[in-house]
Amino acid sequence: MGDWRVIDGGVTAPKGYRAAGITAGLKPSGAPDLALIVSEGDAIAAGIFTTSQVRAACVDYCRERLADKPSARAILVNAGQANAATGAAGRQDAEDCAQLLADTLGIEPEAILLASTGVIGQRIAMDAMRSGIPQVVAALSETGGPTAAQSILTTDLVVKTIALETEIAGRPVRMGGMAKGSGMIHPNMATMLAFVTCDAAVSPQLWQEMLSRAGDRTFNQVTVDGDTSTNDSLFALTNGQSRTPAITQWGPEAEILEAMLTEVCGHLARAIARDGEGATCLVEVAVSGAADEKAAQKVAKTIAGSSLVKSAIFGRDPNWGRIAGAAGRAGVKFDQQDLRIELGEFVLMDQGQPQPFDRVAANGYLTAKAAGAYLQDDTVEIRVSIGSGPGRAKAWGCDLSYDYVRINAEYTT
C-alpha cells in the first residue's frame, strides 16, 4: 500500500465532480441503467479502448473525440443496450445522446464522452434516453458517486467503486473510480467499463501515459472467460481543482500520482475478477523470474485464463499439472527445469520436479486434502517462477463454475 488512505465517495470524492444514477427505462428489469459524471470545469481526459474489430459506436466516437482534444466535461453511461454492431444508425444514436446531454448541461457536445453496455446488436432505446437525460442531470450531486456506480451494472452482483486520498506539494489530492464487469472479460486494452476521476493538475500526455501503464498492469491482466468485449472503455479525468502545481514531467509527484492511479485500477480490476459470472473465488497468479515484465504478464494471464486451471480450482482439485501446462503454452521461452509452482503455502513443483504428496500428511509434504482445503478460500494465490530474470507480474481471474454456463446460456432470453 502506498502513502494514501481510503476515503468514501467514489468518483465524486475528488473536488469538482458531481454524479448521478437513475432508472431511465433502458433495462427491461427496471433496474438503474443511466449514469452521469460531470466535472465543474474542463478536465484533462485520457482513454483506452477495446482492440476488437467489432466495436460499439461509443468506442469509435470517443476515440475520435480524444484524438482531437484530450479534455472532457462529462461521461454518460447507459446500461441495457451495447449499441455495438449497429451500423450508421447506432453511430447516429451515440451522437444524438451527446447532443441531448450537451443541450441539457449547456456545454459543447465535444466535451462529452460516452460508454454503453448491454446486449450486442441492440441500439440504444432513444425514447428512454431522451426522457432520462434531463432526469439524470437533475439528479447530479456531489455525493452521487455510489448511485452512479450502481447504475452501470448488468450481470454484476456487486458495485465496484473506490476512492483514495494522498498529499502532493502539501495539498490533498483525491482520486475515485468505478467499474462494471462480470462476464465477457478478457481485455486487450483496459477493462469492460471503468471511470476514474482526479483533482490533480497533470499534462495531457503524461496523464495518458500513466493511464496506459496502469491499465496494462491491472485491467489488461484480468480474465474471466477469454472473451474481449466490443465496448471495453477506460476513461480518466483530472480537473486540477486540488490547486496543486501542474505535473508536466516525470518526477516524485508523478510517481505518487501514477502509483495511486495503479492502485485504483488494480482495486477495480480485482473486484471485476472476483465478481466473474458464477465465480466462487478470486484467483491471483503471480509470475516471477521472466526475462521482462511483458513475458511475466503473458504467462500469468495464460494461467489465470486457462479453462482447465479454472475448472480444477472450482472442483477444489490441486492439479498443478494444469498450471504447468498453461505456463508452458504461454509463448514465453523458459527452461522447464527452472519451473517452480506454489499454491498458497504449498510447493507443488520445484526445479522442474514434482513434489511428492499423499492424500494424508506425510513427512511434511503437501497433501491433496490440505491443498483442497486451501482451494476453498475466497482468494486463491498461485505463484510461479520460470527462471532468474527480473520480470514479474500478476494476473487475476476466477474459477469456472456450472453457473457461468447457465448465466450465459440464458443471457438474451
Image (cartoon, helix red, strand yellow):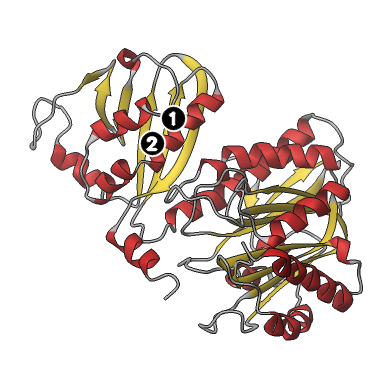
Query: Mark 1 = which residue?
Result: 299
State the mark number for residue 303.
2
Pick the front one: 217 or 80? 80
Label 1 and label 2: CA atoms lie apart by 6 Å
Q: Is residue 39 above or below residue 395?
A: below
Query: Does residue 279 appear left or right of residue 109 in this picture?
Result: left
Residue 244 visible in the picture: yes
* x, y percent for residue 191: 58, 51
* Residue appearing at x 91%, y 74% in the figure: 106
* x, y percent for residue 258: 70, 39
* Residue appearing at x 10%, y 25% in the figure: 363
Q: Is residue 80 above or below residue 234?
A: below
How crowded is the residue under tag 2: few (<14 C-alpha within 10 Å), some, or many (20+)?
many
* The quarter of the displayed image where residue 94 is located: bottom right
Residue type (three-letter) at the residue carrying disc 2: Ile
* x, y percent for residue 403: 31, 63
Q: Is residue 206 above or below residue 145?
A: above
* Residue appearing at x 68%, y 84% in the figure: 128
SS class, disc 2: helix
Marks 1/2 in contact by CB < 8 Å: the verdict is: yes
Q: Is residue 130 above or below residue 406?
A: below
* Residue appearing at x 72%, y 38% in the figure: 210
Query: Does residue 91 appear left or right of residue 246 in this picture?
Result: left
Residue type (three-letter) at the residue carrying disc 1: Val
* The quarter of the displayed image where residue 220 is located: top right
* The quarter of the displayed image where residue 135 is located: bottom right
State the mark number for residue 149.
none
SS class, disc 1: helix
